[in-house]
Each structure stands twice: as structure tokens, then as C-alpha cells.
Image (spheres, grey):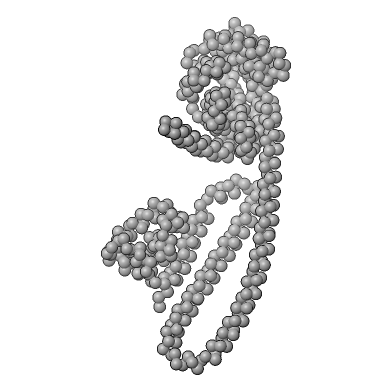
Amino acid sequence: MRYLLLFCFSIVCWSAQSSELDSLMNELETTMQNRGAYDAMRIRRIEDLKSRVVKKNTTAEQRYYLLNELIEEYEPFNFDSTQHYLHINHQLAQSTGSKEYSNATTLKIAQILASSGRYFEAIEYLNKVRANELEQRLQIAYFKDYIKVYTDLGIYSPIPNKLQNYWSIANTYTDSLRLLLEKGSEDYLALEEKKYRDNWLFRECEEINNKRLALTQPGTRQYSQVTFERSLLYEMEGNTEARKKYLILSAISDIESAVKDNASLTTLAILLHKEGDINRAYRFIKFAYEDASFYNSRLRFTLISNILPVINEAYQMRAEKQKKKLRSFLFIISCLSGFLLIAIYFIYRQLKTLNRAQSELVNANDQLKSLNNSLKEKNQTLNVLNEELSESNLVKEHYIANFLSICSNYIDKLDALNKGIGKQINAGKVEDLFKQSKSRKLMDQEVKEFYHNFDEIFLHIYPHFVEEVNALLEENEQITLKSNESLNTELRVFALIRLGINDSSRIAKLLRYSVNTIYNYRVKIKNKAKGNRDEFEQNIMKIDAVKS
């Protein structure tokens, strides 16, 4: 019994986790669609800083700090612009004669070079700085740059016998950095988390990561980094679902903060490709490739370029398979169409035979006219029935004509809509098309026309429906229609019930309301009924059609 309960609990947990992942995946795709808006916010901040940098009344020191802010904005956004303004600020720092400013810009250049995979160029800049001459803030940056250089060399170096040496150097600088950091700071916690992760101490690693998450907010570069490192922990544990969750959170935060130098979406695309989710993997890797191209980081661009052809090939293969299936379906539909034409031909022949039989029957009826005189009384009854049948046939013809007219109108509307969409796509007005697709104007017009057609056709069959419904209600509770109304919502609900549609969910779908609203309308009207309320809907079904 205990094992059964554990199994059921694990099924419930898996279902909840799967639902959460689907929701997060949808949120990620929505965020991707809004990339332009997030980029625009960063560009506005950049343009504002640029305008302040070029003002004539700023001192060299003020310009230095403004350039630092501009570099911070550009750093995750565009590598070339970051480098450009870094070198301008480096020259400005040297012109002021400030050793602190010069060292700070040198370390920043080294950091940017290391992040783009230019490790030995970064080391050249770091060798220009004397660590013992730096204040603590810059010493921290100095050691972090060296750790970044030698950690990445330990990961990406093509020379196997040097890997251990690179890791050893990185660990030495890590020990030096730890002595300078304040316990509880983000940098200190990041080192602690890496230490626990490298030693496979997953519980301690997760506790540190929780502390780091508490220090940041979604939509920031730091949040993206912390959630990405959380995904590394779950990768080592083999927890794929949790890993995907934190990769998605990291990717969303990257896009919202307009970070182009990112790893989360690429890693997620690779993971989805392995799981066989080719369509999403292709969209994500294509998106990451566009970001990497914009940022122009050699390292990130190279990493994505290695996996992009693999995912692209899988996507093309999937698309080709779908085309083959489509061709097969078209062939089957063509065959079925042929069979349908043959069936129509045979039905046509049967109808001709039936028409001949009907002609013969008319002749026989003419011969029996003399006998009909003796059946005059029965004939009168038959005439009444024939009149009702004739009227019923006229009603059917009326509704068939209406139905064909409505179908024709919808075909014309669809044709006009398709042509309009084609023109907008050809004109490159995709944004206008996207706005148009969000508008409810067309839907509201069609719903209004649907109500009008329904009211007209229904009242043609049941012209006294409103009066007979009111006859079933208390005198002070009867329904009064506005001057421009044929039926209102309450009457339409019971009109559908009279037509045999009794299920509230079907009525709600037809009238474009919620099931709860339809239920409330039904209860509200039944509460106004004369006599037994439980028999109200049965009495509705007794209302006759086409009274003379």
C-alpha cells in the first residue's frame, strides 16, 4: 500500500511539473516575440547616455563615469560598441593621469576580451597591471578576470596536457579572491556555490543558489546567471525537468534585460533537440544565433554555429517528412474525391429513375380522379395536410437558401481576408497584420451577424415564440424586448433548447458565453415560471412551429 501511495504521489508531482514547464515554455515564446520592445528600452538608455557624454560642459571625470555607464549598458548587448567605448575611456583615463582610472579600464578591457574568447589578449592587458598597487575593489576585478581566463582555457583549450595546469592556476586565483570578498556577498556566494558544485555536494550547492536568487530579481542579468548556474546543478544530478525549468527562467530574463551574450537559450535548444522537440529547438537556436550575430562574440558565435547546422538539418528532415505526409493525404483525398464523383453520378441516375416513376404515378393518379369524388371528406383532411407539407417545404427552401447565402458570404469574406493578408505579407506589413490578428472587431461583427441570422431564421419557424414563452412566466416577470431586438440572450438560450440543444456547454459555445453564465440564465428564467418550475423546459419543447 505504501509503495502504491508513493507511486501515485510521484505521478501527481510529475503532472504538476509538466504543467509548469508547459506554462513556462509558452511564456518564453511570448517573451521571444516581444524581443524588439525589450531591446528598444536598452537602446533608449544608451542614446540618453550618449547625449550626456557629448555635452560640452562635462569635466573629464564626469565624462569618464558617464562612459563607464555607457559601457555597462553595451557590455551584454554589443561587443564591438563595448570595445569602442572602452578604448575611448581608456584613453581618457590615461589623459587624466589617474592611475586608478587607467587600471580600472585596463581590467575592464581584459574582462571583455576574456568573455569573447580572446584569452591571451586578455592576459596581455592583465600583465600591464600590478596587483599590489590596486585598491581592493580593483583587486577583486583583477582576480575575477584571471579566474575567467584560466577557467575557460581549462574548458575550451585544444591542448589536453595543459588543461590541468589551467585549472590549477584558476584555483590559485580563486583562493586569493576569496580572501578579499565579504561573506554573504554575491561574488563570495558564487565562489562557494562553484566549490560545492565541483565537489558534487548538491544539497549545499542548492542552498547557496537559493541565497543568491534572493539577492536578485527576474529580468536582470544577474538573475539570468544565477538561474543558469542552477541548471548546471540539475544537469549534474540528472534532473532534466528541473534543468529545463531554470534554463527557461534564465532565457526569459536574458531577453527581458536585452542580454545578447547568453548561453541559456542555446543550451535549452540542444536539450530539446536531444528529446526530439525539433520545432522548438530550431526556433530557439535560430533566435540565439540572431542574438549572437548581433552581439558579435567570437566564442558564442562559434559555439552556436557548431550546433545550428545539426538542429537545422533535423528540422529540414522533419519538414520533408511532413511534406511527404501531406502529399500522401492529398493523394488519398484525390482518390476519395474520385469515389465521391462516381457516387454522385449513380445518385443522379437513381434520381432520374425516381422522376420517371413519379411521372407514372401522376398518370395513375389522373385515372383515379373518379374515385376521389367518393372520398371528399378524407380529401379535405388530406388537403389540410398537403397545405402544411407545402408550407413546411417552403420553410425548408427558405432556410436552405439562407444557409447557402450565409456560406457564400463567409466564403467571400474568407477570400477577401486571404487576399488582404497576402497583400500585407507582400508589402512587408507583418506588424500591421499582427495587430489586426489581435483585434476583436471582426469577431464582434461576425457574432452580431450570427445573432441576427439566428433570430430571423428561428422566428420564421416559431413566429409566436416570444409570446408563448411569456405565457409560461408570471405576469410581472415577462420578458420585454427593446425596440431593436428580435430576441435577447435569455430567449436565445431557450430557443436553442426548443431546437433540442439542451447541454449548457454547447449553448455557451454557440452563443459565445461561459457555461456558468448560461446556467445562470436558465435558472433565472425558470425561477420566474408559472406553476412547476421543473416542467418549464418541457413546456418550452411543446411550443409549435409555423402557426397560421
- Residue 62, position in %: x, y? 56, 20
* Nearer to the camera, 332 or 410: 332
* Nearer to the camera, 56 or 522: 522
Asked whether residue 191 is in view, the answer is: no
* Nearer to the camera, 438 or 390: 390
- Residue 267, position in %: x, y? 61, 29
Q: Residue furthest front?
A: 1
- Give the quadrant of residue 375: bottom left
Query: What number of labels is visible?
Result: 0
Please state, as top left, top right, bottom left or bottom right, where the N terminus lies in the image.
Answer: top left
**Looking at the picture, does residue 51 appear above or below residue 397?**
above
Query: Is 151 situated left or right of 256 in this image?
Result: right
Query: Is 411 situated left or right of 521 in this image?
Result: right
Q: Residue furthest right?
A: 159
Please state, as top left, top right, bottom left or bottom right, where the C terminus lies in the image.
Answer: bottom left
* Nearer to the camera, 512 or 222: 512
- Give the quadrant of residue 503: bottom left
- Residue 373, position in %: x, y? 46, 93
- Residue 407, position in %: x, y? 56, 64
**Looking at the picture, does residue 385 appear above or below residue 315?**
below
Query: Which residue: 49% across, 16% down?
Result: 185
**Looking at the picture, does residue 216 appear above or below residue 493?**
above
Query: Which residue: 39% across, 51% down?
Result: 516
Query: Which residue: 66% across, 66% down?
Result: 341
Asked whether residue 8 is in view, the answer is: yes
Query: Which residue: 60% across, 11% down?
Result: 171
Query: Is 156 situated left or right of 495 in this image?
Result: right
- Give the quadrant of residue 60: top right
